[in-house]
Image (cartoon, coloured by chain):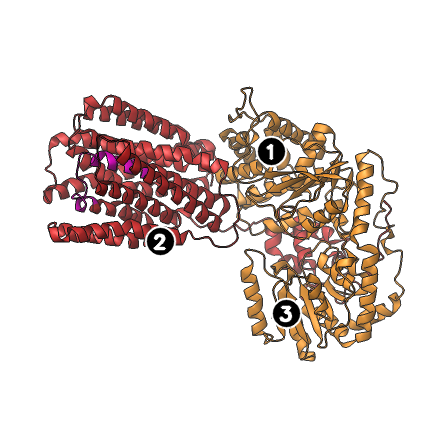
Amino acid sequence: MTAESPPQAAESRLTVANGRAHTPRTVTALCEQYAEVCESAVDPLEIASALELEGLGDQAAKLRYGYADVFALAQDMYFRVPRKPVEPELPPDPWQEGGRLRPVLHSLLYALPGVCFPAAIGLLTGPGAPITLIVALAVAWSAGQGLAFLGYTRLGRTLDIAQTRRVLRLGLVIGLGLIVIAMLAMSRVVQPIHPTTSVLLFGLGEGAYMFGAGVLLVLGAEVWLLVALAPGVLGSAVFLILGRPPDLEHLTWGLLAATPVIALIIAVVRTRPTGPREGSLFVREEWLGAVPAVAFGLVSAGLLIFPVAAGPHGHGGINVGALLAGLPLSLSMGAAESSLLWYRRRTQKLMRTISDIGSFGIRARLILLAAVAMYVAAAAALMALTVVVANAIGLAHWQTGYLPQMAAYLMLGTAMFLALTLQALGSRIFPLVVGAMALGFEILCRNLGVSAQIVACAELLIVTGGYATIVLGRAVRHAW
Amino acid sequence: MDVALIGEGTYPHQFGGVSVWCDQLVRGMPDYDFSLVALVATGNEPVRWSIPDNVTSVTTMPLWGPPPSGPTSRWPGRRKLRSVPCPALGELIEILLAPPGEHLIRFGEVLREVFEFAQTENLSAALSSEAAVELLAEAWQDWNLDATEAAPTLHDAVMYMQLLEHSLRPLSHPPVRADVAHAVTNGLGALPAFAAKWRYGTPMIVTEHGIYMREQYLHSRGGPFRWPVRALHLRLLRRLCSLGYHEAEMITPGNVYNKRWEEQLGADMSRVRTVYNGVDPADFPASEGEPDVPTISWAGRVDPIKDLETLLLAFALVHQKMPEAKLRMFGAPPPGQEAYLERCKALAAELGLSEAATFEGRVPLIRDAYDAGQIVVLCSITEGFPYTLIEAMTTGRPCVATDVGGISEAVADTGMIVPPRNPEALAQSCLTLLQDGSLRRRLGAAARMRALEYFTVDRAISAFDEIYTFVGTGLELPTAELDDESDDLLVTALPERDDETELLEAAG
């Protein structure tokens, strides 16, 4: 190729005026004008790029300041002005989005559905009721975990709310399909149990609510979730306060049914497609990544519910101790979230002020210990409160024999908090495996009653705690 | 001949000048087979261009999203997930901490060792490991910092290793096989070309429309990273650019202006050939007649780098002298810049120009935007060699444009060049042209003549046909472009040069 290039205008005619409108006359003044650029520059070329951006090119560098070109001028400016870089603004704290009250709101959202169960007790009769509800809860919990994982992953990866909505809508459809299949299976396949239609519908509603709630939580629409909960929770509360009047029973059940329907409608509306369809719905890594989340949902539901369902001695019957301890544990997830957010904020702050990786390991472990202590205190307080309230309204009468069960649940809650922390920091398989082993042990040794749960939960806490102590002391785990 | 065309964030996943250029090149060379290699953000981006028949493959290399799966282990179907320390990492960090400009050859050798490692082990896992962060944190302790007030923290070390992991992901992909690897950017976009060169000895070409490194400097200012992270990352990119120039058999900037930066970054000027962008004259026939009202037309992305605020301030001055004058702006903001459009509209309202200056959005045929004005203005603060300008010139519209990038090379004596961010100079030039019909017509005709002679797509394609042939067969090109002093760019004068000189001086 030859260099047959176009003719150019003579340099003197290149510009009508020379340099930008208010360019300083001396290099000193120029350094002052560009002080921030010079102080933060990583090398002279960065200053040259800034000068050119403002229209100060070779011609101005030569004619106005007497340098060969803008690069020579930038070089001189770099050495004249010492480095004093401007610190970037700290990014908004992602763990404070929605304010510090968000975990409190979440606690409320986790706790409120608890009011609905006593009000629906008239619906939940028959021999198939417990197992059907457990299956519904297990499906809803596990698939709900998968749904939340997919939503948060897509949102975090692309920061694209439109894509996230589409993924959530698909997850919602799949979740609803799963709960319908599960309830159909309970009605058709498991013949000896014969769950009633009302039990099946309750299970279906439970699943639908949890999927709708999962979608709304990912989208940060907690207030809308409160709106959906309002009819079911208020109706149940009034019904219970009035002493379960029979003539209000059907109205209450109608209000209970309204909650999942409203939650679903809001979830469908909030995930309506907007803008062009960008990004594939099926990203292999995302869907594969959701599998451990689904499995962990299943395992944690099992660990929480199995002692309740298995009865005090592993042969069925009502396990009051497990109920008294299990209920506050599910309510304590708000406290777990709050402790986790505190832990993440503190470790981030530490990382931004320390340079020695060894010191970080030690101090990060101490912060973890403090976070665990915060959670344990909150969970123990909730358990005590539950016992006091249940005793006061006559739902259950306290016996010291419940203490071992409560201790087991407290250990389970602590292990779950550690598992949650590990998952938040990228370790998802280990808590799942250890949790599955603990659940397996409880099922195999159910004849031992509460002793089996104590051993399983102690093992779970020790192993998860040991692993967390090792892994969460590493700086790379806290990369954000 | 097979050509691997390597881009970053452009063809075929995004629109824009570089993508237009790539599409023109591929479609204009049907006898060549092209393998497209696209560095993309997440891998989730849709292909936005229809793929020409002579494209044999499209390979995406996501820099973000999940890390690339490691190489296959000896167990069939299994991937290497385990983190094995990368032996070259320590020296790579040492080199990056050294002042830029030193150890370029050794940097190339170390990067090649990293590439070889990435082909057999999981590089992403190695760079994300605690050991890697520890290596950097310790090396930083001994760093003779320019900025003593910005001492690196552990958070900085973790952030930087993450940046490095993402940046070097292209090295973990299997090298592309082709006769020529043509990187249409430098920096990270050169990594797949290095890989092909190291593995198969594929000769490489680097084309820059803008200057990669200059854009990185500008882009990083005001970013989220502290000085130590920014410094190290920019040093990596700077070294990659220098290595790109060093390894390339041919450097083909899109304008002569780029050569200044390439020289600063260590490019061997004897390997530089400027190849200008071109347009298809059939798409831009000469405009017939002019609008009745004095009208300035602007077309492009509504983006801060286009500096529409200066244009509006300049037009306010024009409007004072010529109240009947109109400013018509065609184009839409890219995603994320909608606020800029609103800001410009607010400025227009504040200047009392809401009726005279109109934002007209996208036009189906960009030619109509040029036809809409008696003159076309481009007032960007940074440019490479913009299509808008050479398209407007091809239609025969005289242009007033800012002296940035390759704009003065494109316009030369066929329009008016003003400094950027200078509303007074811009207004003065616009008024001169709007008030003098004969000057407008003469410059317009000269602009069209110049564009048809130098800035056609056929000319660009035949240049690359020649470059591919010579580089692909290992032959040396017959002539080398000359250095700045003896550059032949100033040899030929346009016939009306003297007249225009006077006119421009009068305008000044």
Q: Which residues are magenta?
A: A117-140
The amino acid type, in three-letter code, at marker 3 is Leu
Q: Look at the numbered disc 3 and give the secondary structure of its residue.
A: helix
Q: Look at the numbered disc 1 and give the secondary structure of its residue.
A: helix
Residue A413, can we see it? no
The chain drawn in orange is B
Q: Main structural element of the magenta stretch: helix, strand or loop?
A: helix
Q: Are marks 1 and 3 in contact (CB under 8 Å)?
A: no
The residue that appears at 45% across and 31% down in the rendered structure is A358
Q: In front of the other: label 1 or label 3? A: 3
Q: Are marks 1 and 2 in contact (CB under 8 Å)?
A: no
Which of A435 and A132 lies nearest the eye of the viewer?
Answer: A132
Label ID, residue B312: 3
Residue B472, compared with residue A452, is above or below; it is below
Q: Which x, y percent locates residue A459?
A: 29, 24
Question: Badge 3: few (under 14), some or many (20 or more) residues near its Cα, within 10 Å?
Answer: many
Q: Quadrant of the N terminus of chain B?
A: top right
Q: In front of the other: label 3 or label 2? A: 2
Question: Badge 1: few (under 14), some or many (20 or more) residues near its Cα, within 10 Å?
Answer: some
> What is the distance, in whole Å, between disc 3 and disc 2 at their CAs?
45 Å
Residue to which mark 2 is pinned:
A266
Q: Which x, y percent locates residue A329?
A: 24, 38
Label ID, residue B485: none
Residue A85, can we see it? yes
Q: Chain of mark 3?
A: B
Q: Which x, y percent locates residue B319?
A: 66, 77
Q: Which x, y percent locates residue B24?
A: 73, 49
